[in-house]
Each structure stands twice: as C-alpha cells, then as structure tokens.
Amino acid sequence: MGKSNFWSYAAPFFGFMIAGWYGLSQVVQSKRDVRIATKGLDTVEEMDPVERMRQRYGLNEGNGSGMTQGRGGRASVTAPQISSIEEELETTLKKVDIKDWDYKAVPREKVEDE
C-alpha cells in the first residue's frame, strides 16, 4: 500500500465527492432562486412574462375579448354568468336527447396476417 493505491482509489473518490457536492449545491441554489423569484405568485397567469408586463404598466386588452382589469392592474377573464347549476343542466338536457340514440360502430383498420 503505497502512493499508487492512493492515486488509483482515494483521489478519484475524493474527486467525485467534491464534484457531487458542487453539483448538488448548484441544483439546490437554483431551486432556491426559483422559489424566491416566484414568491407571492399563485397562478400560472401571474408568472407569465406578458402578464407581468400588463401588471407593471397597467395595460389592458381593449379588443373586447372579455378581459377586464382587476385590482392592482391585473387582467382577469370574466366568466359567463350562470344563475344555477340546475338551470344549466336543464338547458343541456334540452340540447341533448339521451333516451333516443343510435349505435354507430367505429370503423377499424383491418389487420393483415403476415
């Protein structure tokens, strides 16, 4: 057991240990950076760069697309007003007849035996 064993076994081991420590520290630091950058942002829309620009400069889409500017300059989509779930069910049932239907087979590809 001389110098040759140290350089063939211990030096690579310590090298991998140091490289692994450095790699893991970079991964953990990037995770922390993302957490700090997104702190206070709850939705994907708020993390969107275009949405951030709208918030920062108070921009609003004025093309009538249903977008309105809420508190803090944040753009939000206005949902269609539904008075109740029961009324929505009745209108859907009027559109779709679930008792009178015809079975239609789905065409399938023919498999040829080789």
Image (cartoon, rainbow, N blue to C red):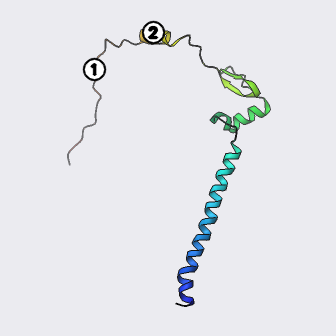
Compared with 56, 20 (above or below) is below
Q: Residue at x 65, y 35 (%)?
A: 42
Compared with 39, 69 (above or below) is above
Where residue 106 appears, x then y in whole percent?
A: 30, 28
Residue position marked by numbered label 1 in the rendering: 103
State the separation of the CA atoms marked 1 and 2: 25 Å
Where residue 92 appears, x then y in whole percent?
A: 45, 13
Closest to the observer, 34 or 100: 34
Instruction: Identify which amino acid the numbered label 1 is placed on.
Output: Tyr
Residue position marked by numbered label 2 in the rendering: 90
Is disc 1 in contact with disc 2, using a CB cutoff of under 8 Å? Answer: no
Quadrant of res 80: top right
Instruction: Identify which amino acid the numbered label 2 is placed on.
Output: Glu
Closest to the observer, 57 or 32: 32
Compared with 15, 31 (above or below) is above
Mark 1 neighbour density, 10 Å: few (under 14) some (14–19) many (20 or more)? few
Which numbered mark, 1 or 2, is in the foreground of this view? 2
Where residue 7 appears, x then y in whole percent?
A: 57, 84
Closest to the observer, 88 or 17: 17
Q: Residue at x 75, y 32 (%)?
A: 55
Judging from the image, what secondary structure is the residue with disc 2 in? helix
Compared with 7, 35 (above or below) is above
Q: Hey, which residue is sitting farthest left in the picture?
A: 113
Please give the label number shown on residue 7.
none
Lower sequence index among marks 1 and 2: 2
Q: Hey, which residue is sitting farthest front in the picture?
A: 1
Q: Residue at x 63, y 55 (%)?
A: 28
